[in-house]
Image: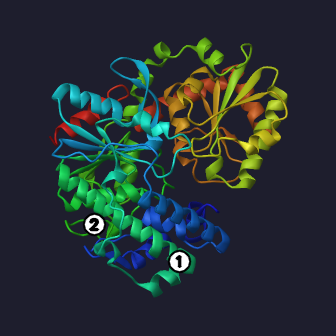
Amino acid sequence: MKSIRVMLMSKIGLNEFERIIGEIKDAAVFDENISLINPHRTVVYWIINNDSRDIKFSKFIAQSLYNYRKYKNLSFKYNAPREGTVNGIFLAMLSDFKYIYDLEKMEITYEHEFNYNIKNILQKQHNIDILEILYYSFLPKRPKTILKVANSRRIPFETYITRKLTKSENNFYCNDTMIKNHLGLEAYNYLKYVGFRESIRWYLAWKKIFKIHKPNFFFLISEYGPFEYMGVVASKNENIPSIALQHGVICPTHSGYYHHPKNVAKKDGDNINYVLPDLTLVQGKYEKKLLLKWGYPKKAVLVTGQPRYDFLLHADEIFNKKQIIKKYNLPKNKKFLLWATQTHGLSKEENLRNIKAIFGAMNELKDRYHLIIKLHPLEDQNAPLYKRFLNKPFATIIRGRENTYELIHISDMVITKHSTVGIESIVMNKPIVLIETVKSARLNLYTDYGFRNIVQDKYDLIEYVKLLESGELLDAFEKRRRIFLRDRICCLGRATENVAKVLEKFL
């Protein structure tokens, strides 16, 4: 399926997008007067793109996932819903579990990269009862992945969902003509028979969770996701404060955070306009400035820093270059260029151009440098596109679930586009170059701060390697890095404590 976000920016623009959303946002309402359209996630992916086969296939996949989550349990027994009240509820998405660093013990552990250290501080200092709700939107290839993170304090969201559609779950209204005119028949069918109904089930399950446990707060990541959004709406209607933490990059082209101020709910009980969390915690001044510009109230945005980066203050103590090279079976006698790919988010044409540029440069650099291709966790981990053209041993492909920070640590330069890997590289004092073989506005989060080393062909990358070796690239990088960290990465080393203090106020 073509990139809908790109289409939105290039064909109709953000303002036009807001106009369309403004017209259809109340076209489908639940019986509790809840708009079932999360404008920046649900509708965005289903605006018709004149390729009915793609829409039908996507509808089939979505319907299959919906049926799986509605009727099936996994092959193992998981924890039953807990009874009684808790001090706070944390949402733990399965995709956010990684090998991270325990800030207290300073050791590697497989845990939720956002929640784990924050939760430890709260429980150690206040001995509070926190319930983590685990959610997985797909069946993992290895069910042991869920068993690994499931324990007596972590309950799968699905345990709160009833198997049969109730009368209230079926009681919603669709303005057929309005939606069909804007989105087309296939998108309409998806929304009516999959998107709306699943949103209803999510919303009612969240209400059930909040009614049973009566938490003092609801803490989540990625509040713009359709599943998470239903949690925010339900928490509002149960008078439970919702606190969202920045997940990845917030930049001028991120539709998840973009809201026209007039479309943001400003009164209690307004569930038709877009409902924002009570508080959104961001990693820097830049992100706060953008959110205020895009409709967030001033009192609803707070700069705390990014907790998952706190351990990077101790990176030199944690990482051992020799051990990392041995772990990934990398050559000992070469320097490393790290390429953080985003294959799943780019067109085939752009991916092929990127490969041509980087592999072309490596053909000339291979005697001195080795390329590390770090796959994005959401792309095909078999890497067929890269293996197809990788006929010389100048590169090693690393799977998405491996530790990106280790690879940044041993690299001399990092190649990225608009990934958070660029931010992490800057924090870890590793120079970045930006791959842009197809023109894009998404580089702004780096180019606005003077990081303008753009790779459009193999000659650009070869030239930047020469500048790296001469020291010119590093000198320029250092100056820009100081300004970037001041605006984008607040409170490095203290962010986890800052977030914990915010949550303490709700106890």
Q: Residue at x 33, y 46 (%)?
A: 220
Nearer the observer: mark 2 or 1; the answer is 1
Residue 199 seen? yes
Q: Residue drawn at (55%, 13%), measured in percent from left and top?
A: 320
* Relative vertical location of residue 327 with respect to residue 289 in this rendering, above or below: above
- Determine whether label 2 and label 1 are within 8 Å by CB: no
**Residue sitting at x 64%, y 63%:** 2
- Image quadrant containing the N terminus: bottom right
In the image, residue 323 lies at what x, y percent?
59, 13
Q: How many marks?
A: 2
Residue 167 image position (x, y, % from top left): 30, 75
Which image quarter holds the C terminus? top left
As drawn, 174 above or below 12: below
Lateral position of residue 28 relative to residue 415, left or right = left
Q: Nearer the viewer, residue 271 or 86?
A: 86
Q: Which residue is mark 1?
A: 183
Mark 1 neighbour density, 10 Å: few (under 14) some (14–19) many (20 or more): many
Establish if 179 lies above or below 150: below
Residue 381: name its quadrant. top right
Secondary structure found at label 2: loop
Q: Which residue is mark 2?
A: 265
Q: Position of residue 450 (x, y in %)?
A: 56, 39
Of the image marks 2 and 1, the number of the one nearer the N terminus: 1
